[in-house]
Amino acid sequence: MTGDSQGIVTEPTAPEPFERLIEKARRSYIPLTIHWELTGRCNLHCVHCYVPPDDGDAELTTQQCFDVLDQLADAGTLWVSLSGGEPLLRPDFFEVAEYARRREFALRLMTNGTLIDAVTADALSSLRLMSVEISVYAASASVHDCITGCEGSFELATGALRLMRERGLTTVMKTPVMALNAAGFEATRRLAQQLADRHVYDVTIIPAKDGDRRPLESRLTPDQLRSFFEGRVGAELPNIAESAFSKPPCGAGIRTASIAPNGIVYPCVAFDIPTGDLRRQSFADIWQHSPALRQLRQTTFGGIAICASCETAGICGRCSALAHLEDGDRCGPSSAACAVAAAKLSVMSRNEREGGNGH
């Protein structure tokens, strides 16, 4: 699986001039960012993948994709991330992407890179993509290929990053950190400095959408988390601004949404709460009238009492989707986030006692 489909769920970094736009989107519920899984099909078999195997039979047609893009433009969407599965497995990928560019969306491509040769790279370059984001799991081909279940995938992924940079595209290398690759992370980080304009990593691994919890076997243990955060966190615990308590915990269903290959709309890629079906409803109808979205928008960080009063609130990356998926309560704490925050706090407390600041 590719990009955000590996538990790395990010919005584009907004330059300062756009901060007010993002705040307006939050207040007015404008879906600025859409993550679109064009297909569930993939040519890799990553151990941590959360998307169940898919034969592609239920995918939206090319024309339906065009219609959805028209609706998103009308709704005020600016950024569209094309993901999967492996989006380049769709024969009509370039038709859909070119139509999206004609509608003037800023496009991010999230791919495993294995299908990008020089010809494909030239075609991608002509799309004027905002970024091409490729997952590389290690600086070692054997570790990367072990995670993807596909021999040779490391050479193809790193080769794709080189092809993209040669053509002047902004490249992002993504690394979900897990038990299999954590020990070699510094080498991976150095590789990213050579291959990409930006490196994004995350320790978040999520369950599969069909309830399969095997991806979680790849998570770092508490001891591994503490070891990973050594030297990566300082000693000072940040405070949360009072105003933050009145805001939603994240942008899911507020300024972002996710579209599955079959047209089902979700608050984000990790939330398994369907909010509507684009084959039967318009995006505007779903976005404006979904009871599930309305309920989600009423949740604030301050309303999650146990989280708002927690000593790790300033360093916690709590995810409502994970709280729902793993702990059964989107308004409660997320045990996964609690484990990560506890590991950070342990390291920060020791740094403080020893008078160090990390680096």
Image (cartoon, rainbow, N blue to C red):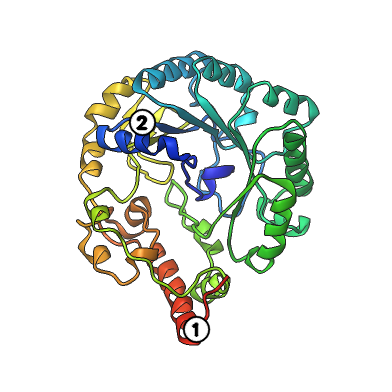
| Amino acid type assigned to the residue bearing label 1 in the image | Gly
| Amino acid type assigned to the residue bearing label 2 in the image | Pro
Residue in the foreground of this view, choosing between 112 and 352: 352
- Callout 2: SS: loop
Q: Position of residue 147 (x, y in %)?
A: 66, 55
- Callout 1: SS: loop
From the image, which quarter does the C terminus lie in?
bottom right
User: At x 25% / y 55%, what residue is drawn?
Assistant: 331
The residue wearing badge 2 is: 31
User: At x 21% / y 51%, what residue is drawn?
Assistant: 246
Q: Position of residue 103 (x, y in %)?
A: 49, 16
Residue in the foreground of this view, choosing between 340 and 322: 340
Q: Position of residue 119 (x, y in %)?
A: 78, 24
Viewer can see residue 64: yes
Q: Image quadrant of residue 68? A: top left
Viewer can see residue 259: no
Cβ atoms at labels 1 and 2 below 8 Å apart: no
Determine whether, in the image, residue 324 is placed left or right of residue 82.
left
Q: Is residue 326 above or below residue 69?
A: below
Determine whether, in the image, residue 120 is placed left or right of residue 21.
right
Residue 355: numbered disc: 1
Determine whether, in the image, residue 173 is placed left or right of residue 317.
right
From the image, which quarter does the N terminus lie in?
top right
User: At x 69% / y 58%, what residue is drawn?
Assistant: 188
User: At x 45% / y 19%, what residue is drawn?
Assistant: 69
Residue 212: numbered disc: none
Number of numbered tags placed on the structure image? 2
Q: Position of residue 65 (x, y in %)?
A: 48, 19
What is the distance, in whole Å, between disc 1 and disc 2 at their CAs?
45 Å
